[in-house]
Amino acid sequence: MIDFDGTLNDAISATLGDETPIVFLPKAGGSFPGITGVFTQITDHIFDADGEPDANITVATLGAQTSQFSALNAPVPVQSDRFQIGGVAYVVKDVAVDGLGWAYIDLGKQ
């Protein structure tokens, strides 16, 4: 059996993981610094019926190995938990775990 977490996910974290400090702050309490993840922030536009840009939106996501949370004795993130990434606070909007040990976490700026 292939160890996806120990091979693929470790390589993704090591290669693409941000050097920005990431702290996990579960709603239930506690603080778990030291998470390595792939953080992305994409800005896009919402257009009105006339095709004119009506507003800008920013979508923030964090990808991380689920094994990092268990190694820190932390729960896997769920909706309404928080992260602090580079000193900016984000709330968890949604979490999808892929079955290979990787979590896709949708974030909203607080």
Image (tube, helix red, strand yellow):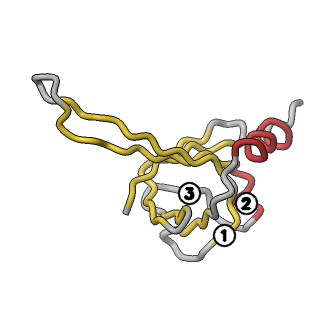
Residue 101 image position (x, y, % from top left): 71, 42
Residue count near mark 3 (Cα–Cα under 10 Å), binned few <14, some 14–19, many ≥20: many
Lateral position of residue 18 relative to residue 79, left or right: right
Going 45% across and 51% down the picture, which residue do you hit?
107
For disc 3, the marked residue is 77
Q: Residue furthest bottom?
A: 30
Q: Earlier in the sequence, mark 3 or mark 2?
A: 2
Residue 102 picture location, percent across and down = 67, 42
Frontmost of labels 1 and 3 is 1
Which residue is located at x 31 percent, y 43 percent? Answer: 57
* Amino acid type for the residue under numbered disc 2: Ser
Residue 68 occupies quadrant? bottom right
Farthest residue, direction right: 1
**Residue 20 appears in which quarter of the rendering?**
bottom right
Q: Between tags 2 and 1, which lies in front?
A: 1
Q: Is residue 58 above or below residue 73?
A: above
Q: Residue visible at 78% across and 47% down?
A: 14
The residue to which callout 1 is attached is: 33
Give the CA distance from mark 3 to mark 2: 11 Å
Q: Residue placed at 53% from the left, 44% from the top?
A: 40
Per the image, the residue denoted by label 2 is: 70
Q: Which mark is residue 100?
A: none
Q: Amino acid at mark 1?
A: Pro
Classed neighbour count for the residue bearing mark 2: other residues with Cα under 10 Å, few (<14), some (14–19), many (≥20): few
Return the x and y of residue 37 as percentages of the image width and height. 65, 51
Residue 42 versus residue 30: which sits nearer the camera? 42
- SS class, disc 1: strand
Q: Amino acid at mark 3?
A: Pro
Q: What is the quadrant of the C terminus in the image?
A: bottom left
